[in-house]
Image: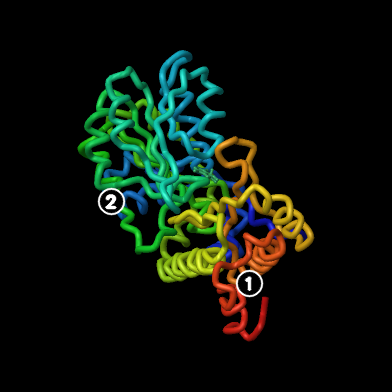
Amino acid sequence: MPLDLAHNVNPHGPAPAVLSTLAGLSAADLYEYPPNFTAGRPSALAERLAELCRTPVDRITLDVGGEGLLKGALHHLVRPGERVALPSAAWSHYRSLAVGVGADIVEYPVAPFGNEYIVDIDALLELADTGVRLLLLAGPANPTGNPFPLDRLPQVLAAFRESVVIYDEAYYGLGDHPPDIAALPALTERFPNLLVVRSFSKLYGMAGMRIGYGIAGDGLAGFRDRTARYLGYSRPAELAALAALDSPDHYDEVRRAMVAGRDLIHRSLDPFDGVTAYRSQANFVLVRLPGYAVGPVRASLSAAGVCVKWFAEPQFVDCARITLGTHDQTLTVLHALVSALSRARRHATPRRADLIPAYQMAAAVNGGRR
Ligand SMILES: Cc1ncc(COP(=O)(O)O)c(C=O)c1O
């Protein structure tokens, strides 16, 4: 089986409590409609999320992953020909969704500066009075891993008061610092046109459950009605998500493993001239290779049975996006990458010839396992 490090899933997986909850499902959990429907209440998951996010429960929307929310929002809120502003370096699916509703797409610049992608907030603010119907912000962003500059977010939201603003936080909780689950939801009070999108696919390791949630301000009540379900949502997915939310220690360990994985990738690739591993706050790292190294690296990864994400977009054409797997999986991909880079060309060899690649040290610390 090839090692899939191409899809930003989280092989640390869900908390043990999630698996035991699923193992304990009864037939009635499946053949009955969810109890909130029969009791005429909001779903238990929405109630729990509202409590954690310190927000009224009617602001919580559930859907089939972050994708369901993003697609639903674009279809409900944007008419053909209306303007949608997207980051210039972004998840390519944003563009597909905007094209799907016939939007007039405009981009605001997100560009590399050293080893980090930076959102050009001043250029973004210049779009504020140009009739943007929907602005999409992302942080941490895919595939670049950069955070959105949160200190400037209120300024951006104030400037785009007349637009719908979606903040895609699918990669919530994986950054260098412990997350604050209520921070962005709090902004929906001051900015009723804001929709925060989150997912159980990434931090919570439950991409297969297909569940995500949004926090939508009161200006988006029509969209909330559209996502509300008379008969409820998937019972197994809701129970699994509730068990995940009740397992904060597990997810703090996952986050720490991500911090360590990113650090290992940086230390392993830093010695190579012409290679840039962009700073990331997500469960992946985007790596730019010198053109001549792309072929050898691809061949080496493929020989090692490792799949990473390569891109068709010109701006990422020499880039590989590596999903952070378990520690051993990260060692495997680094071994293939570093060996190929070392062989690729004289000037791709480590700047410091005596330096032992970080992944080898990590492997040694782990008793030579890889
Ligand atoms: C930036 C971004 N947003 C949203 C999603 C949607 O994820 P899901 O539908 O699994 O919640 C993804 C998935 O990879 C993503 O990369």
Is 196 on the left or on the right of 2, as rendered? Answer: left
What residue is rendered at 56% in x and 59% in y?
A: 273
What residue is rendered at 45% in x and 33% in y?
A: 227
> Farthest residue in the top direction?
81
Vertical comparison of 114 with 226: above or below: below
Q: Amino acid at mark 1?
A: Asp
Which of 104/208 is in front?
A: 104
Vertical comparison of 355 with 96: above or below: below
Residue 217, position as x, y percentages in the image:
29, 35
Vertical comparison of 272 with 328: above or below: above
Residue assigned mark 2: 183
Q: Secondary structure at mark 2?
A: helix
Vertical comparison of 209 with 158: above or below: below
Label 1 lies in ligand 1 vicinity (Cβ under 8 Å): no
Is 280 on the left or on the right of 329, as rendered? Answer: left
Looking at the rendering, which quadrant does residue 148 occupy? top left
Is 82 on the left or on the right of 6, as rendered? Answer: left
Which of 211/23 is in front?
A: 211
Q: Amino acid at mark 2?
A: Ala
What residue is rendered at 55% in x and 35% in y?
A: 93
Residue assigned mark 1: 328
Q: Secondary structure at mark 1?
A: helix
Residue 41, position as x, y percentages in the image:
37, 43
Task: Name which of mark 2 and mark 1 comes first in the sequence.
Answer: 2
Residue 267, position as x, y percentages in the image:
51, 68
Depth check, mark 2 against mark 1: the one in front is 1
- Marks 2 and 1, Cα distance to the nearest angstrom? 34 Å
